[in-house]
Amino acid sequence: MIRRLWTEKILQRGGNTFVPTRIKLDDHYTDLKYQLKKYKELKAATAQITFTCFDEGKKCYKRVAEDSNARCCCGGCRSSLGFFDDDIIFEKDFETYNKLFINEFEGKKASGFWRKGTGCALPRELRSKTCVSYNCESNGVRDMIGAIESRISTLQQKIRVQLSTVLSRQIIRPRIKKKYSEPKADSESPKAEDKPLGTPKEYWSVHGTY
């Protein structure tokens, strides 16, 4: 059984937006479906950028170094849980994150999602916005990276707005309706989870398990 350490920690932290697997995106949500698809595609597309700080094997000089002090920004992967601060995270990918996340530094071999000799263990589309758009050096690709980061941020904002509507219509309202339709004693007052929850953050604050 795969441990759920990363999932538990990332849900406790807050700040990110989670896409539940139980939502149904039919023809009424074609725009949201497109945005969710494009969000991952943009992250994956950063693999095509020629970062001048990479060697011929396409490995970052610092991030795959033997010395843990030379891992650059990846050195904080464990404590930051992968630098996920305001990202869109899909519940269907929870298993992958939990499987690859290591919460200890094992003899300079691994920490968080970082691995000695290979760098990040996550595919690019599952990495944080910070990880796919950060460039240590000032060179010709910074403007290109900045443009992609801006586009990803714009998609995040649109996804949050539309996802709130989907959660409210498909999960939260039916749940509240069902609870209130059940017979209750006169002395029984509505519970915290009975209250309408309009945003993904509010939803996961109550339904933070899977």
Image (cartoon, grey):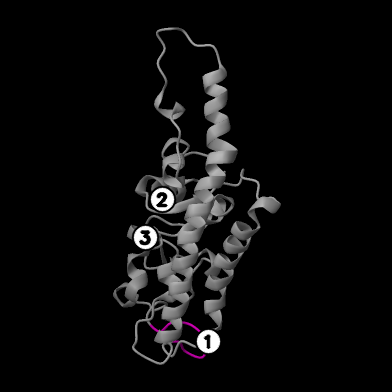
Query: Which mark, residue 57?
Result: 1
Residue of label 2: 10
Image: 61 above or below 97: below
The picture places residue 200, in percent across and down from the top left corner, at 46, 46
- For label 1, the SS is loop
Mark 1 residue crowding within 10 angstroms, few (<14) / some (14–19) / many (20+): few
For badge 1, the amino acid type reads Gly
- For label 3, the SS is helix
Q: Earlier in the sequence, mark 1 or mark 3?
A: 1
- For label 2, the SS is helix
Residue stretch in magenta: 54-61
Most common secondary structure along the magenta stretch: loop
Compute the Cα span from label 1 to label 2: 32 Å
Give whichever of 173, 3 is nearer the camera.
173
Instruction: Locate the N terminus by quadrant.
Output: top right
Give whichever of 142, 109 is nearer the camera.
142
| Membership of 85 in magenta stretch | no
Image: 148 above or below 174: below
Compute the Cα span from label 3 to label 2: 12 Å
The picture places residue 114, in percent across and down from the top left corner, at 43, 67
Compute the Cα span from label 1 to label 3: 25 Å
Q: Earlier in the sequence, mark 1 or mark 2?
A: 2
* Residue at (47% x, 62% y) in the render: 156
For badge 3, the amino acid type reads Arg
Picture quarter containing residue 116?
A: bottom left
* Residue at (41% x, 62% y) in the render: 82
Q: Earlier in the sequence, mark 3 or mark 2?
A: 2
The picture places residue 209, in percent across and down from the top left corner, at 49, 38
Q: Nearer the viewer, mark 3 or mark 2?
A: 2
For badge 2, the amino acid type reads Ile
Farthest left residue in view: 69
